[in-house]
Amino acid sequence: MGGCLQRVLPVFLLLCAVVFGGCATARLNVVNAPPVLTQDELLRPYYKVGNIQVRRSRYGSHADLTPADYSWAYDALRAEAQKIGADAVILPEVTVEMDTYIFYPVSEMKAKGVAVKFR
């Protein structure tokens, strides 16, 4: 009996940590990342470096989204633009699609934009 408990207890504790621990999100390093610019702010000539697209899924309905979720989208675009050496991101689009996973609502957030380099 004692040997069985010693084998089952670590598995049970690991399962509890996974179920109740939640998900840790990585912080994006956007201190020196390129800005997201609107067409009005784009005053210098530029050329397109590439299209950027990021996505993230989270449990919860569309109503559970906060301004921090939208900030994540813009910060993720900026971080991706920084990886490819862009000077700015233009034409940002953020969309949210709803789905369900078993009984839980799931929101999938997608953001895309155009990475540009100034001449």
Image (cartoon, rainbow, N blue to C red):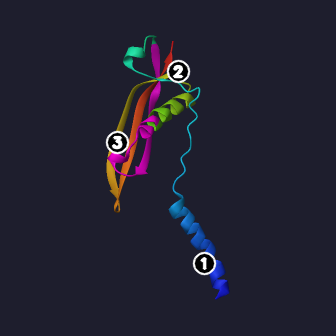
Which label's residue is closer to the chain start, 1 or 2? 1
Q: Secondary structure at mark 3?
A: strand
Specify the amino acid type for callout 2. Asp
Q: Magenta region: which residues?
A: 46-71
Q: Which residue is mark 3?
A: 96
Amino acid identity at mark 3: Val
Q: Are marks 1 and 3 in contact (CB under 8 Å)?
A: no
Label 1 – label 2 distance at C-alpha: 54 Å
Asked if 101 appears above or below 70 in the picture, the reply is below
Quarter in which the N terminus is drawn: bottom right
Q: Decide: marks 2, 3 in contact (CB < 8 A)?
A: no
Q: Is residue 37 magenta?
A: no
Looking at the rendered structure, the secondary structure element under dot 2 is loop
Identify which amino acid the numbered label 1 is placed on: Val
Judge depth for marks 1 and 2 and give the one in front.
Answer: 1
- Earlier in the chain: of badge 1 and badge 3, it is 1
- Left or right relative to 100: residue 78: right
User: Along the line of sight, which residue is nearer the eye, 34 or 83?
Assistant: 34
Q: CA distance from mark 2 to mark 3?
A: 27 Å
